[in-house]
Image (cartoon, rainbow, N blue to C red):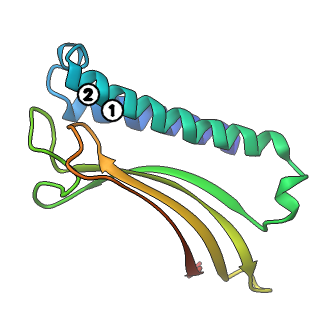
Amino acid sequence: MSGIKLFISSVIAIALLSIAIFVKRPVDYFKTGEGKGVLFGIAAAIGATVAIALFAFSLKTQALEYFDSGEVYLGLDATKNISPMCYSGENSDRLTSNLGARFSLLKSDDGQASVNFRYTHHSCAFNPDNRSYDALGFEAVYRIW
């Protein structure tokens, strides 16, 4: 399976499986005002990340010559207690969604170390947001293997 197909199918599978496990009565919930807002956030996060991945996949050469590597990601984190990103509610208030992109600015000759430009977003996954954040920054990475 190609990388782009694996990424898109994994994102969709994780989203659907997470909704099935963590959203109580999803059909009813996503009909409510609160649920519509949460569903819009899920769709926007998946849509934006998949669109960036597809755009990068279609470039193949031009823009990618300036950066050694670039990636987008989506994920879910489960906190031990209520997530600071979530209001307590009907669904899981421990799941925090995260997504972002990183682009390599410098890379070592052996490929093990890099300095990246990064965008990160965190918010509540299935309840209304108590907090959320968007951040731009830099990171130093050492690849262990």
In terms of secondary structure, where does tag 1 sit? helix
Which residue is depicted at the point 84% across and 65% down? 66
Q: Quadrant of residue 144?
A: bottom right
Q: Nearer the viewer, residue 85 or 56?
A: 85
Q: Which residue appears at 80% of the width and 86% of the height? A: 109
Q: Is residue 13 above or below residue 62?
A: above
Location of the C terminus by quadrant is bottom right
Which label number is shown at residue 20? 2
* Image quadrant in which you'd find residue 114: bottom right
Position of 64 with respect to 102 (left or right) is right
Measured from the top left, where is residue 96 in percent x and y? 28, 51
The location of residue 72, given as percent across then percent down, is: 59, 52
Kind of residue at badge 1: Leu
Label 1 with label 2: CB-CB less than 8 Å: yes
Q: Is residue 14 visible?
A: yes
**Image position, residue 46 (x, y; %):** 49, 36
Q: Which residue is mark 1?
A: 17
How far apart in space, not on screen, are marks 1 and 2 (Cα)?
5 Å
Quarter of the N terminus within the rendering: top right
Q: Is residue 68 left or right of residue 80?
A: right
Give residue 56's mark: none
| Nearer to me, 78 or 102 | 102
- Secondary element under disc 2, as helix, strand or loop, is helix
Task: Identify whether 45 is placed above or below 20.
Answer: below
Name the residue type under label 2.
Answer: Ala
Task: Say which residue appears at 70% left-offset and 70% top-offset.
Answer: 104
Viewer can see residue 1: no
